[in-house]
Image (cartoon, rainbow, N blue to C red):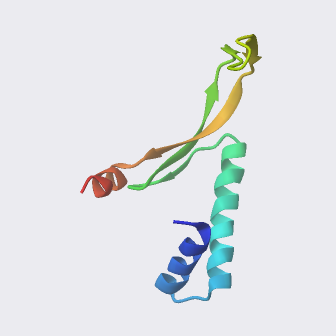
Amino acid sequence: MTKDEMIAKIAKDAKINKRQAADALSSFFWNVTSSLKKGKKVGFVGFGTFTVNRRKARIGRNPQTGAKINIPATKVPHFRAGKTLREAVKK
């Protein structure tokens, strides 16, 4: 599902226009991103939890030359599905 398809579904389900649905979805994305940048966890009971995980620095290899390269430590977003979502997808 694309962002445009999601906006259309939200507009139809909430009986609002597409502009309002787009604003609501953009607000959701912005608030989740903002919270994760601050190091906070964002959780929705039954749906899942967004967190930030740290990846350690490591040594990798350039696939073209085989030379060793240093890969720096970084933070990456992570989503863990909640029980209700996991069970709904299984069916």
At a point 69% along the width and 75% down the height, the residue shown is 23
Looking at this view, name the residue that lies furthest to the front.
Answer: 64
Residue drawn at x 70%, y 60% as measured from the top left = 30
Q: Position of residue 33 (x, y in %)?
A: 68, 52
Q: How many marks?
A: 0
Residue 2 vertical placement versus 50 (above, below): below
Please say if 39 is above or below 19: above
Q: Nearer the viewer, residue 21 or 3?
A: 3
Q: Give me the residue at 70% from left, 12% from top.
A: 66
Percent coordinates x, y for residue 42 in the rendering: 56, 50
Q: Indicate whether 50 appears above or below 9.
A: above
Query: What residue is shown at x 47% (from left), y 83% (from top)?
Result: 13
The image position of residue 80, as x and y in percent, is 46, 43
Q: Identify which residue, 91 or 51, lies in the foreground.
A: 91
Percent x, y for residue 72?
75, 21
Q: Is residue 72 left or right of residue 24?
A: right
Quarter of the image that includes the C terminus: bottom left
